[in-house]
Image (spheres, grey):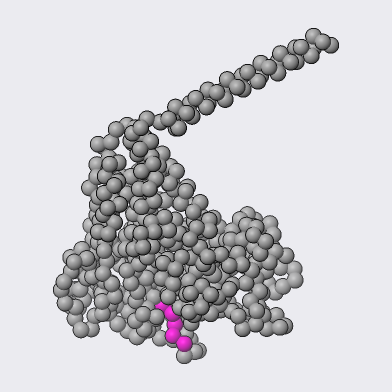
């Protein structure tokens, strides 16, 4: 018996010694490889994380520009923009779960999207009379949301800013000092030669889509000289450099992150006000005109580590409460949302603005309130059922429209059995409670004690909600309006 105990003890000590030896070896490796990495690697890593935050919108937009520039493939069901350089891609339907390019697409409006190049003369966008919502005297909401290559907003054409009448509107390139015709209104100056236009035209329902499609076919995009000559043709643009898909080819994108960033900042130079910051990245060969081949092997390893850490970090920030006002489990975005770069808030620009929405609205145009936790502070999950109740007379204060849309963690819509992705003021058949309030039910299964018309299907796992309020009331812009809590049932 004693011999058995001694044998067991000896075995235990042997195992312990092996564990300690392995742990010590791993610790030494970690110490030498990461904690005490060569100075040049560590220097490039620490500075590279900051550079990755700054450069992320340039990399993301390079990826999306290339993906959306590709021609449509035969027999391919089009769910995302194609051939969308210097001409509008017109969505053939409302966004659904087949679209997988992220950015939180809405299910309220038909998209008309274009990546635009303009370096020598203005681009003129022409729109017809948009008119009113059928059966009402209320203007049909539309907007052309214009964002620079760094993801900051440039300006708007639309219901709120220019009205619903027919008109012609110009985006001028940086430094252009010509004169526009009297019938063309300037709506913005692009600080970058490439910029993005995201058009949204409100759809009241499936029966309304043909009328919206007819309107969108009249949207035109021309150079100023062609506009003045009465010529309808696609403006010229340089070739679009290849870039991996930022969601579907993440490993490849990470391996090319810095070369893509440098190329994008060379063709779309950062704002002059950012010069002092961008100049600090010269030591690691990041920025316009920089040459990565000049780096030591250690610095290149440090930059690779920085990209590998930087992208997951942005996703973590996006899911956090950083710079958000939390009310009843809902998160108001920063008040400078849409133009974070102009405020020097580059983490907000990268994580919330660019990753979160590609380009995002100014609060005066639309406020997106994010719901990711219930009233108890727990993460929303399809294993539970939830109810949101708007008190009588307390629906979201929108001058145009509002909706609640459900997304997964890839910032895409979630496939479900009834093809319902949102609920809002245009959802047919919504049922009010007896006291005049209205309840929405969110869960993987239909509600047992509520109308299915008020049900928003959820996946089995985690999800989040976006409450969109278009042309919001001032109480929303100032973040005084309190959205109702999500009660777990």
Using the image, determine if residue 274 lies above or below residue 389: above
* Residue 478 appears left or right of 44: right
Left or right: 216 with respect to 180? right
Q: Nearer the viewer, residue 297 or 32?
A: 32
Does the image show residue 120?
Answer: yes
- The residue shown at (53%, 58%) is 321
Q: Main secondary structure of the magenta part?
A: loop
- Residue, x 46% and y 65% (percent of image)? 334
Q: Is residue 96 left or right of residue 228?
A: right
Q: Quadrant of residue 169?
A: bottom left
Q: Whole-percent x and y of residue 377?
A: 64, 59
Q: Residue placed at 47% from the left, 90% from the top? A: 137
Residue 268 x %, y %: 26, 57
The image shows residue 280 at horizontal and vertical percentages of 29, 47
Indicate left or right for 147 with 321 as reference.
Answer: left
Q: Residue at x 68, y 57 (%)?
A: 383
Whether residue 443 can be seen here: no
What range is drawn magenta here?
A: 138-142
Q: Does 107 sit above or below residue 316?
A: below
Residue 103 part of the magenta-drawn span: no
- Residue 5 locus on image (x, y percent): 79, 14
In the image, farthest residue toward the top: 3
Q: Is residue 139 magenta?
A: yes
Total labels: the figure holds 0
């Amino acid at each position: 018996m004693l011999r058995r105990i001694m044998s067991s003890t000896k075995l235990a000590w042997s195992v312990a010694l092996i564990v300690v030896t392995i742990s010590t070896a791993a610790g030494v490796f970690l110490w030498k490889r990461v904690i005490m990495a060569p100075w040049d690697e560590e220097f490039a890593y620490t500075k590279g994380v900051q550079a990755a935050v700054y450069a992320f919108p340039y990399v993301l937009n390079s990826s999306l520009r290339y993906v959306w520039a590709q021609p449509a493939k035969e027999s391919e069901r089009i769910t995302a923009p194609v051939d969308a350089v210097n001409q509008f891609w017109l969505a053939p339907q409302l966004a659904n779960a087949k679209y997988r390019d992220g950015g939180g697409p809405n299910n309220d409006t038909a998209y008309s999207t274009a990546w635009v190049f303009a370096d020598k003369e203005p681009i003129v966008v022409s729109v017809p009379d948009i008119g009113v919502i059928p059966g009402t005297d209320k203007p049909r909401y539309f907007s052309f949301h214009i964002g620079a290559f760094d993801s900051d907003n440039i300006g708007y054409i639309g219901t709120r800013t220019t009205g619903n009448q027919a008109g012609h509107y110009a985006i001028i390139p940086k430094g252009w000092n010509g004169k526009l015709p009297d019938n063309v209104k300037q709506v913005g100056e692009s600080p970058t030669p490439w910029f993005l236009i995201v058009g949204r035209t409100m759809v009241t329902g499936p029966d309304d889509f043909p009328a919206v499609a007819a309107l969108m076919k009249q949207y035109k995009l021309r150079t100023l000289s062609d506009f003045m000559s009465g010529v309808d043709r696609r403006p010229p643009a340089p070739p679009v450099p290849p870039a991996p898909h930022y969601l579907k080819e993440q490993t490849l994108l990470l391996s090319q992150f810095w070369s893509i960033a440098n190329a994008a900042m060379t063709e779309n130079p950062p704002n002059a006000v950012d010069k002092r910051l961008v100049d600090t990245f010269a030591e690691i060969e990041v920025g316009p005109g920089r040459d990565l081949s000049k780096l030591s092997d250690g610095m290149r390893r440090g930059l690779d580590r920085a990209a590998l850490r930087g992208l997951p970090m942005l996703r973590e920030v996006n899911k956090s409460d950083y710079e958000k006002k939390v009310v009843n489990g809902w998160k108001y975005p920063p008040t400078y949302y849409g133009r974070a770069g102009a405020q020097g808030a580059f983490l907000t620009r990268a994580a919330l603005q660019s990753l979160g929405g590609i380009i995002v609205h100014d609060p005066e145009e639309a406020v997106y309130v994010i719901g990711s936790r219930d009233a108890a502070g727990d993460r929303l999950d399809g294993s539970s059922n939830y109810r949101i109740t708007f008190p009588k007379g307390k629906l979201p204060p929108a001058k145009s429209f509002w909706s609640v849309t459900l997304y997964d963690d890839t910032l895409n819509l979630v496939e479900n059995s009834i093809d319902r992705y949102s609920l809002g003021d245009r959802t047919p058949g919504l049922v009010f409670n007896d006291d005049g309030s209205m309840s929405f039910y969110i869960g993987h299964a239909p509600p047992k004690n509520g109308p299915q018309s008020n049900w928003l299907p959820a996946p089995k796992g985690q999800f989040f909600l976006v409450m969109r309020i278009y042309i919001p009331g001032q109480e929303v812009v100032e973040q005084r309006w309190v959205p109702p809590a999500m009660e777990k049932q």
